[in-house]
Each structure stands twice: as structure tokens, then as C-alpha cells.
Amino acid sequence: MTRQSSPAAKGLRAAALLAAGFLAARAVDGRPESPSEPVVFGPLAVKGLVPPMTGETYPHAIRFARPVWLKGFALSLLDERREPAAERGMFCHASFARVVPGGLPRVFLNFQDGYEEFRLPPGYGLPLAAGTYHLLSMLQSGSPDTDRAFHLRRVVDAVPQDEEPGLAPLRTLNVGVEGSALGLRPVQPERLYHDGVRCSHWWVPPGEREFSVSFTAPEDGSVKYLAFHLHAYAKEVRLSEEGGRAGAPLYRGRVELDERGEIRRMPFYSSAEGFPLAAGKRYRYSVVYDNTSGAPVSGMAGMIVFYHPRK
């Protein structure tokens, strides 16, 4: 994974590439298919030095002919031989999203190194309307000598809603730590400033530091699943009630890293019992980075909350 600042020209190129990827996603309309069957797609080429979030977006269409329950999703990076890739640090992300005309995609999942399988607790499903969804995938490289082509293998566990009417529906809440709110310098301000203020992609200084954000629950419910998106050198995630009861957080997860600081395994939370989410209550999402590289590294700290509304 690249950890040095990139020139402004690369930032402008990133803006063009990402916009092109979204336009391509709107143009591609996959045929209705049996999503439970494994599908290999690609190739995704990566050539030369490609900093995080500056590669070309590869839009892969997944179409549901009827409304479905999404119960699981597995995604793995394959090498040139279409075998599981051994490298870490080259898979920037793959976002499962619904592209909104005239806007940014609505993201339901982010896959990356160390997070290759999503599985909801039994009895629950994420309701998705009929139509076309996309995997928006991107690679990265820290070496100017890189010249590779990868594939992705995906398996979607989705069932028509009328075939399992008894599943309990989940809703999603996207929470992100904004680097600009922390006074941190953004990595690519030309592209990542959504409204001129917020930036979810920033430089993490050397050393151990904690970054956090406060948010409000939209309604009463019960949290059943938590998914995260982090970068290299991330150490820990926590979700707590803000200003509430002392003691252990609602969830605390550790990130497993390799000797280079790349992510080997991501934390996630999954429980049919879950824990309560109260409307109007403030919660705090915190992420700890331990940057031992001696130089700034790119950082993100996204969280997607899957909760069952009390209603």
C-alpha cells in the first residue's frame, strides 16, 4: 500500500477516473441471474505506482429480477492464474452499492484485505429492491514496477423476498470519521470533499492516535451486525454510548496486522441477540491507528451498522 503523498495531478486524475467509473456503472445493466452461483470477473489491471483511492474503478453489475433478502456475500481476490491472491496491500476496496443518478452510490458493504465474507445472523435479511447493483472495485500499488492483472470471485446469498417472508428486515446506517473535522490534512481534497467540508480519507501521522466521531441513532432498534473499512496500521475499533454508563463499550474489535502493517484480518460484529439502539441517543465510534512507519499513512474509518428497527 502506498503511504506517501501523491501529486496534485494524480488527485485530478483520480476525480476523472472515479467519475468515469460511476458513469460506467450506470451504463452497465447485467442480466437477471442466479446470484448464489460463483462468478469470476475481471481482469482488474494495476500498473505502476497507484496510491490508495486513485486507481480505476471497475464496475461489475449484479441484477435482481425481484426484490430480495441479502443474507450473505463472499468476495475474494484472485491472481493471474485465478487462484487466491497471496499479496496483501493491493486490494483497495470493493463496494457493493446502488448507484444513485446524479449522486454518489449508496454503499451497503465494503470488502477489502481481511474482510472477504459478509454473513448476517440467521433469521435476518437486508431487503433490496429489484434492479441493478454494482461492485465498484479498485486496486492499488506501492511499487512503480507493478504490472499485474487480478480477478475477483463473488458469491451472493440472496433469496426472493416472497420465498422467505418470515425474515426480519435490517436497515443500514453509515458512519464515518471525517478527517477534516479533526484538523487532519486530506489525501485527495479535489475528489473526497463531498460538500466542501467533510473528508473521509486523510493522512494519519506517525505514532498511536485515536480518531472518533459522535452520531445519533435514527430510531429504536437492535444492532445485529457491524462492518468496518480501515487502512493499514489500524489497530482497534470501538462503539460506545456517549456520556453514558461507564464500563465496557458496546463493541470492541481488534485488527490483525502482518509484519508490514497491512491488514490480515478485519474485525466485525454479528449477533442474533444484538444490543439495543435508542432513538436520539448519542453514540461514539472510535478508531485507533498505530502508525509505526515513521511517515504519514493514508487512513479511513468507515462503519456500517445493520440494525433491526423496533417498529
Image (spheres, grey):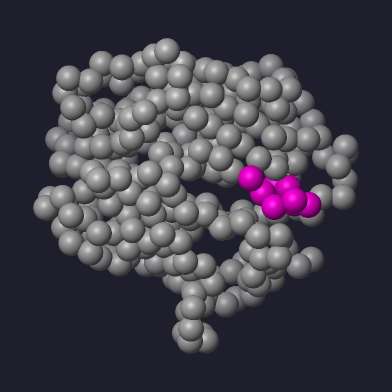
Q: Is residue 281 above or below residue 30?
A: below
The residue at 19%/42% (across/down) is: 3
The residue at 51%/38% (across/down) is: 116
Q: Residue at the left extreme?
A: 294
- Name the spot of residue 95 as percent of width and height, x first: 49, 37
Report which quarter residue 40 is drawn in.
top right
From which residue to which does the magenta span run? 119-126
Q: Is residue 218 above or below residue 60?
A: below
Given residues 176 and 87, the one toward you in this image is 87
Residue 99 visible at all: no
- Assign the C terminus to one quadrant of the image: bottom right
Is 238 colored magenta in this rendering? no
Report which quarter residue 108 is drawn in.
top right
- Name the spot of residue 8 as percent of width and height, x first: 17, 36
The residue at 37%/33% (across/down) is: 91
The residue at 59%/69% (across/down) is: 217
Q: Is residue 251 above or below residue 257?
A: below
- Assign the N terminus to one quadrant of the image: top left
